[in-house]
Amino acid sequence: MSSNAPVAAPVSSRRWWTLAVVALAQLMVVLDSTVVNIALPSAQADLGFSNGDRQWIITAYSLAFGSLLLLGGRISDLIGRKRAFIIGLIGFAAASALGGLAGSFGLLVGARALQGAFGALLAPTALAVLTTTFTIPKERARAFGIFGALAGGGGAIGLLLGGYLTQDVGWRWNLYINDVIAIIAVIGAVFLVPTIARSGPRPKLDIPGTILVSGALFALVYGFSNAETDSWGSPLTWGMLTASGVLLIAFVLWQRRAAHPLLPLSVVLDRNRGAAYASILIAGAGMFGIFLFVTYYLQVSLKFTPINTGLAFLPMIGMLVLAAQLGTNLFVPRFGPKILVPIGMSLGVIGMLMLTRLDLSSSYAANVLPALMVLGFAMGTIMPASMQTATLGVDRHFAGVASAMVNTSQQVGGSVGTALLNTLAATAATDYVAAHLPPTATVAAEAAVHGYAAAYGWGAGFFALGAVVSVLLFRRRGHGLSLSHTAAPAVATAAVAESEPVVAH
């Protein structure tokens, strides 16, 4: 290990309390990904912004979060996990308060962008704190399993809490709730999160690399978001996507010669880690379709309330947590990613194909619930193996940026998946109406379900691609990286929950 690596952390007697604090911070980020989206209709009615502008409440967060994740992970490596963790908590809380107080659309969008920026610091730092706090392999697996279960359950809590706050308290409390959690987490972090000293000179921040990759990720997310509103034929859409590709190539070339690279290429060029990041990206693209279109189907087609919609997803979250626990503690050590990830991807294909059979006469218990449970188990099977492999064997002083790559993969996958599936669903619905004139209310309802089915079909294709990629790229057991004292395995379901997609109302 290089001389500027952090000194290995001693086994702390407060490590389980550290887990509680970090899980609380993760819960805040997870809650924000669900409660704010459920609050959108009320916020729109209060502030008076248009349907076209509505997406920017979501996009502002994902733009900042996705484009700054690698920078956030590297900052946590450079200034220290504890300091970065506390700064992320305070900044996220301040941005949440600003959003809750917002009296205009512009201020709310700005607050959401600030939330994304501080979330990009907080998310990879939370994972990195655990990788450097739990150094005993058996305890580390248990800690990541507990953390993943809490984070996964946080998604369900967000669905229910968002519905309750919006209906009975007010949409602004969907933002204020973060401040309550952050105050507790900051107090806990000050006293319970260990400080790990560095030895040797502090490496410098890679400014050119930061600008290049942040610009590339911003252009990518913006380009796909723009495709939702201005169509795939828009010059702005293709201009941003082209710029993203050019900037990404420039970033890779710069990383090969930079003295202090933002993302050492060895982190992503290892075959197993590359396969893990690709699997996370592909699964993230498919996963967004599950939440987005099933939510629309439940609320618009089956007339579920926001609270009932949250309850409807609980079995899926339960299966995700169950599969993640089994994977983290039992299946991953025994079978490895080359077996588990393709199995999970195949289950994803089955679950998505089950959803394509939904129509206006379908019921939740008989038709929706079985598919959601299969998909929950699929995601819980894919993620433990992928995420543990994604940071396995990475030197401890790159734990933050390696963890950030997990989040980045999901954000990119989610952005691509959302834009692509939305566009395909809208096109399918439009074609259905054109083929069933005149456009009555019944035809419109059937067209919407037809569009959802098209999205599920493409989602199945995403998972099928993931199955092929994971079979071909992951090494067989015994040919991969071995876990050492410098390894930094990532959490099983934390990032699943963290990137739980837009729950639209």
Image: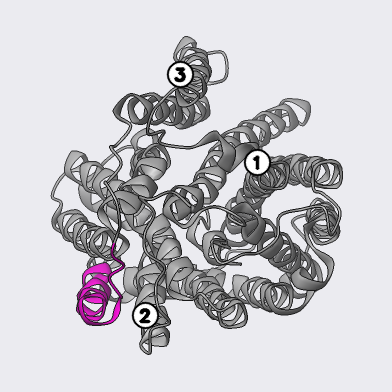
Residue at x 30%, y 59% (from the top left corner): 198
Give the answer, above or below, for where 171 lies relative to 244: below
Of the two numbered discs 1 and 2 on the same chain, state the one appearing first in sequence.
Answer: 2
The image position of residue 16, as x and y in percent, is 42, 86
Query: Given this view, does label 3 or label 1 mark the residue nearer the observer?
Result: 3
Residue 472: quadrant of the picture: top right
Callout 2 crowding tier (Cα within 10 Å): few <14, some 14–19, many ≥20: many
Magenta segment, prevailing SS (helix, strand or loop) = helix
Of the two numbered discs 3 and 2 on the same chain, state the one appearing first in sequence.
Answer: 2
Callout 3 crowding tier (Cα within 10 Å): few <14, some 14–19, many ≥20: many
In this picture the colour scheme is one colour
Q: Residue furthest bottom?
A: 13
Query: Bounds of the magenta span?
Result: 177-197
Residue 339: quadrant of the picture: bottom right
**Can the viewer see residue 232 in this picture?**
yes
Confirm or deny contact between disc 3 and disc 2 (CB under 8 A): no
Reading the image, the residue beneath label 3 is: 247
Residue 419: quadrant of the picture: top right
Reading the image, the residue beneath label 1 is: 444
State the separation of the CA atoms marked 1 and 2: 52 Å
Q: Is residue 405 left or right of residue 483?
A: left
State the separation of the CA atoms marked 3 and 2: 38 Å
Q: Quick one: SS at disc 2?
A: helix
Reading the image, the residue beneath label 2 is: 18
Q: Which residue type does callout 2 highlight?
A: Thr
Residue at x 58%, y 38% (from the top left corner): 266
